[in-house]
Amino acid sequence: MIDVRTKILGLVGYPVEHSLSPLLHNQAIKRLNLNYVYLPLPIKPENLREGIEGIRALGVLGVNVTIPYKEKVIPFLDELDSLANKIGAVNTIKNNNGILKGYNTDVSGFARMVEKDGGCKIKGKKAMVIGAGGASKAVITALCSKGIKELYLLNRNEEKGKNLIEIYKSKFPDVYFIAGGIRPEFYFSLVKKIDLLVDTTPVGMAPKENVDPVIIPEALHSNLLVIDLVYNPGETTLIKAAKKRGAKTLNGLGMLIYQGSESFQIWTGYTPEISHWKKIIKIK
Ligand code: NAP
C-alpha cells in the first residue's frame, strides 16, 4: 500500500509506453514486500533538464533511463560510476540524498543474455553490431570486455559509427574493428564471416513494427545468433527473417531482465527473482 514512506522509482524516456519495466519492477516490489513504487515518467525532449532536476526536487530514489536519453542525461548528473563514465551512456540513476549518480547495467545485462540465454561464449567470436547510440556502446563494451575477436560496426550515420570505433580501438587493442554504413555492398560478405549479429537500432519497434529489417534477409545464414534489442514486438521483422534462414535468435527481453535486476539491486539492495520475471513475460 502506498503511504508517506513509499519510495519512488521510475522510468525516464520518451516515449515510455512500450516498456515492460514498470510491470517487472512493481511485481518484484510486491514479491519482496517492499514499500516502493515504480512509475513511468515520460519527459519531453524540451523538458529533459527540468525533468532530471525533478528527480532531485521530488526525492525520487532512482530511475531507469531509456531511449532517447541514455547519453543526453549525462550533463545533468553529479557523478558517474566508472563503467558509465567509460562508455558515456547511463541507463540507471540513483539519487543519494540529492546527489544524482549514473550507472550502466546494460553492459552486464547484454553479456549475461548472450552467454546464458543464447548459449554463446563471446570469447574468440566475430560479431556485427548495427547502430551507434547508447545501447550500441553497451553492447560493444560487453563484447570487447568478454574477448570478442573481430567486431564490425554498421551505422546509418557512417561518420558517427567510424568515430565511435576509433574510441574503442584504443581501449581494446586486441580486437580487430571495421566500421561502415548500412549498405549491402559493405556488409553482405562480412555477415558471412560472423557468429553474432546484434541490431541495436529501434527499427521494427512498436508502433512501427511493419518495416523492412535493417539489413537485407538474403545476407542472413544458419550459423548466426541474431539478437534484436527490441522486445516489443517479441518478433521483429529481423528476427522473423533470421528464423526463416535457420539462425538462432534472441529478442531484447533477456537483456531487459538482467539489466533491470542489477538496477533494482543498486536502488534497493534487494535482488529480484529472475525466474519470476521470466515467467511474467513468458520466456524460458
Ligand atoms: P539511441 O541512442 O537513440 O541510438 C539509436 C541508434 O539507432 C543510432 O545509431 C541511430 O543511427 C540508429 N537508428 C535509428 N533509427 C534508424 C533507422 N531508421 N535506420 C537505421 N538506423 C537507425 O537509442 P538507444 O538507447 O541506443 O536504443 C536503441 C534501441 O535499443 C531501442 O529500441 C531500445 O528500446 C533498445 N534497447 C533495448 C534494451 C533491452 O534491455 N532490451 C536496452 C537498451 C536499448 P544514427 O546514428 O544514424 O542516428
Image (cartoon, rainbow, N blue to C red):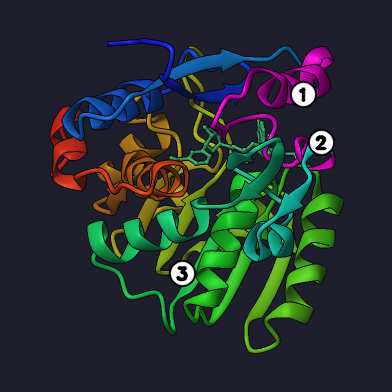
Q: Quadrant of ligand 1?
A: top right
Give the distance between the C-alpha atoms of the residues marked 1 and 2, in whole angstroms.
Answer: 8 Å
Q: For mark 2, does the 10 Å Cα neighbourhood hold few (<14), some (14 to 19), or many (20 or more) residues?
A: some
Q: Is residue 172 visible?
A: yes
Q: Nearer the viewer, residue 171 or 97?
A: 97
Dividing the picture into quadrants, the one containing residue 85 is: bottom right
Give coordinates of residue 108: x percent, y percent: 45, 60
Label annotation for residue 62: none
Q: Report x, y in % for residue 128.
A: 54, 61
Q: CA distance from mark 3 to mark 2?
A: 39 Å
Q: Do tag 1 and tag 2 residues touch (Cβ < 8 Å)?
A: yes
Residue 258 lies, in percent from the top left, at 35, 49
Residue 99 part of the magenta segment: no
* Tag in front: 3 or 2: 2
Number of disc labels? 3
User: Which quarter shows the N terminus?
Assistant: top left
Disc 3, SS: loop
Q: Amino acid at mark 3?
A: Ile
Calculate the distance from the C-alpha at mark 3 to the C-alpha at mark 1.
Answer: 44 Å
Residue 84 vertical position relative to residue 171 in the rendered view, above or below: above
Is 4 situated above or below 196? above
Sequence order check: which comes first, mark 3 or mark 2? 2
Labelled disc at residue 76 = 2
- Pair 1/2: label in front: 1
The 10 Å Cα crowd at callout 1, few under 14, some 14 to 19, many 20 or more, is: some
Left or right: residue 274 compared with residue 208: left
Q: Sequence-wise, which precedes: disc 1 or disc 2?
A: 1
User: In the image, what residue type sits under mark 1?
Assistant: Glu
- Residue at 75% across, 66% down: 165
Disc 3 to disc 1: CB gap under 8 Å: no
Q: Which residue is mark 3?
A: 194
